[in-house]
Amino acid sequence: MRKKSFLVLIILTFVLEGVIAGILLYRSRDIEQDTVAINDCIKVIEENFGQNDKYLTTRNYSLIDTDGKLLYKNAHDISTSVNEAVKNNDTILDVKQGDKVVGKVLFHNDTQERIGKYQKAIAVTILVISAVQAVIIIAYVIYLKKTIVKPFDELSGFAERVAGGNLDIPLPMDKKHTFGAFTEAFDIMRDEIKKSRAAEKAANDAKKEMVAKLSHDIKTPVASIKSASEFGYELAKEEKVKERFNLINFKADELTVLVDNLFQSSVHEATEITVSPRENDSSSVREAILHADYLKRAGDFTIPECKVFTDKLRLQQAFDNVFINSYKYADTEIKVDAKLEGEYLKVSIRDFGPGVTDEEVAVLKEKYKRGKNSEGKDGAGIGLYLASYFLKEMD
């Protein structure tokens, strides 16, 4: 609509310019001396010769006698002699009294002046209309910049952001400009891509989390099988039986390595592990500790009766990692204490190994970080990181 309005305005200004110029040019053709007015002046002069106050002033002229003496003139800068009149192409007419010529009237030729006025009027008209056209064009350029250039630049920037993976910044929408409908469609596309990527990420994380959960859950029974096979190996007397127990132990080690690799790969790739705490009895804490302590190093302990806000699965995995680390690095008896402190149930798990320095305690809670005493021990520095992460998410 605005484009049509602009074209109409431009066309109208050109038409107006042409019409005005045509009128002025047409009028400029009619600039010859007005013979009727000249004849009227001559007639009045002849009738009132010598009475200057009765002469007409409709034309600029001067009156001289037959000797060239100036008798009258009604304007400045006009011819006062025949020679000057001839040079200026003035109209020269005789004044008679009867049949006798008593003087001459020199009518001023103002043709050039009138032509100049018309030319000036034409120039001013063209200049004014051109200025109006310039204003209209500038206004339209600004309009185009606002409705086409700027939105196009925004679309280009939006495309670059989407190509770079930035899907969080929406595209400003304005249905008034040319790309209004397109910007809305592009922003809907951005939103759908964002949702699609979020769904894809959630699905991948869920898959990786499931693999991590399964691999971790397999580790505990495998460790129990390994422990039982080692115990059976020590008790067996027949060589064939010992070989069977040794094979079970060897295969358990292989399975442990495979499960560890699968677990580490899944945890490394997963960007988020879901923790969903809910209200449970404190007896669930005791069960988790008993299940984690498959070597029965903790002995007897009690847990005060209360309600706890935990995710059973994640709490079990946290205790599993703590006990596995104790078995691996301390290999001593384990002491478990539990007591109520305000609104919290505090559980302390302690072994009697060499321990770690205060500086290492914070580091061990980071992903892929291990203590100085980990040389020669299998592991990837994931266990305590996950235990700390799960407990923080349940707080």
Image (spheres, rainbow, N blue to C red):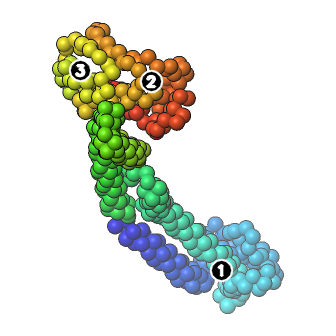
Residue at label 1? 111
Residue 273 badge: none
Residue at 24% of width from left, 13% of height from top? 302
Mark 3 Cα within 10 Å, few/some/many (few <14, many 20+)? Answer: some
Give the alpha-carbon distance from disc 2 to disc 1, as whole Å.
Answer: 122 Å
Q: Secondary structure at mark 3?
A: helix
Q: Nearer the viewer, residue 139 or 316?
A: 316
Tell us which disc is closer to us: 2 or 3. 2
Of pointers 2 and 3, the one earlier in the residue sequence: 3
Give the total of numbered labels.
3
The residue that label 2 is drawn on is 330
Hey, which residue is sitting farthest front in the picture?
238
What's the CA distance linking mark 3 and mark 1? 121 Å
**Of discs 2 and 1, which sits in the foreground?**
2
The correct choice, above or below, for 306 with respect to 232 in the image is: above
Q: Which mark is residue 286?
A: 3
Give the answer, above or below, for where 184 lies relative to 302: below
Residue ID at (65%, 75%) = 116
